Amino acid sequence: MLLKNMDSTLVNGSLGIVVGFTGEAPYNTTYALLKCLAPNRTMNDDFSADTLLSMECPVVEFADNRQIIIEEDSWNFETQSKFCVRMFC
């Protein structure tokens, strides 16, 4: 289940099935990884296929048949009592 929005259709609470992991066939080529990148991700000098292969991230298939690499992420927010919370997914 997604814990935060990725685009207008993959939102917090979207359910999917883990179909593989980066670094394992068929998700062990640059071409395969590019097809499965999250909508808000692009490859650049700081983020490459080699980075994804070493992270062993799950590849999740959603109801719309899209397969997306789900990377670890963290974010902070404050509640009314000023208590800071850090979330990981």
Image: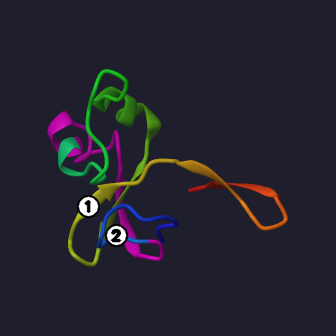
Residue at the image position 22 percent from the left and 66 percent from the top: 66
Label disc, if present, on residue 10 of the rendered structure:
2
- Which residue is more in the foreground, 27 or 70? 70
- Image quarter where the C terminus lies is bottom right
- Up the image or down, 42 lies above or below 76; here it is above
Which residue carries the number 1 mark?
Answer: 67
- Which residue is more in the foreground, 18 or 65? 65
- Up the image or down, 38 lies above or below 13; here it is above
Residue at the image position 59 percent from the left and 49 percent from the top: 74
Residue at the image position 26 percent from the left and 33 percent from the top: 43
Stretch of the chain drawn in magenta: 12-33
Q: Tag 1, which secondary structure? A: strand
Q: Where residue 59 appears, x then y in whole percent?
A: 35, 56
For the residues carrying marks 2 and 1, which lies nearer the camera in this image?
Answer: 2
- Which residue is more in the foreground, 85 or 36? 85
Residue at the image position 47 percent from the left and 76 percent from the top: 13
- Up the image or down, 41 lies above or below 85; here it is above
Residue 70 picture quarter = bottom left
Which badge, 2 or 1, comes first in the chain's sequence? 2
Q: Where residue 67 appears, x then y in whole percent?
A: 26, 61
Q: Where residue 88 appears, x then y in whole percent?
A: 61, 54
Q: Tag 2, which secondary structure? A: loop
- Which residue is more in the foreground, 73 or 61? 73
Label tally: 2
Asked if residue 15 lies in the magenta stretch, the reply is yes
